[in-house]
Image (tube, helix red, strand yellow):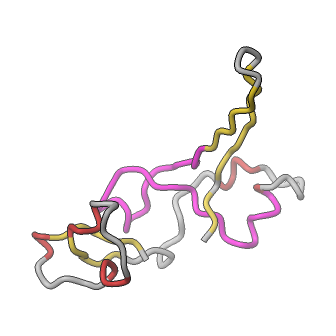
Amino acid sequence: MALAGLWEVWHDPVAACAVRTFTIVTTAANEVMARVHRRMPVILEEPDWPAWLGETARDPMALMRPAAGGILHLWPVSRKVNNPANDGPDLLESVSQPEQSSLSLK
């Protein structure tokens, strides 16, 4: 999955160093993501990559749309995913009690 992003390098004249910045471009949530949040990253499908990268003359603003249905799937996972100290494939396993879980994207 490719997300639309922007990057820039800013040269700080006082510290004489380069500062690299990056941002993920967001749009309104599609039907699936709206269950979790009102916004979502702009997901670029492979045929759209050349337009986003400026390799074709297509207007990249046309890509600023919610992802098509069927690209993302949600399932309940343990709240352990909220702590960066936790790591492992078990964090992706579905839990049976959604009220004690967080939603995961696939």
Quarter of the figure that contains the N terminus: bottom right
Above or below, comparing residue 89 to residue 101 in the picture: below
Image spot of residue 41 (x, y percent): 52, 55
The image quarter containing residue 11 is top right
Image spot of residue 2 (x, y percent): 64, 66
Quarter of the figure that contains the C terminus: bottom left
Q: Is residue 26 left or right of residue 79?
A: right
Which residue is at a point 11% across and 79% down the rendered structure image? 97
Residue 25 lies in the magenta-colored region: yes
Q: Which residues are magenta?
A: 23-51
Image spot of residue 9 (x, y percent): 75, 35
Foreground: 94 or 18?
18
The image quarter containing residue 31 is bottom left
Above or below, comparing residue 93 to residue 9 in the picture: below
Q: Is residue 14 left or right of residue 68?
A: right
Which residue is at a point 11% across and 70% down the rendered structure image? 100
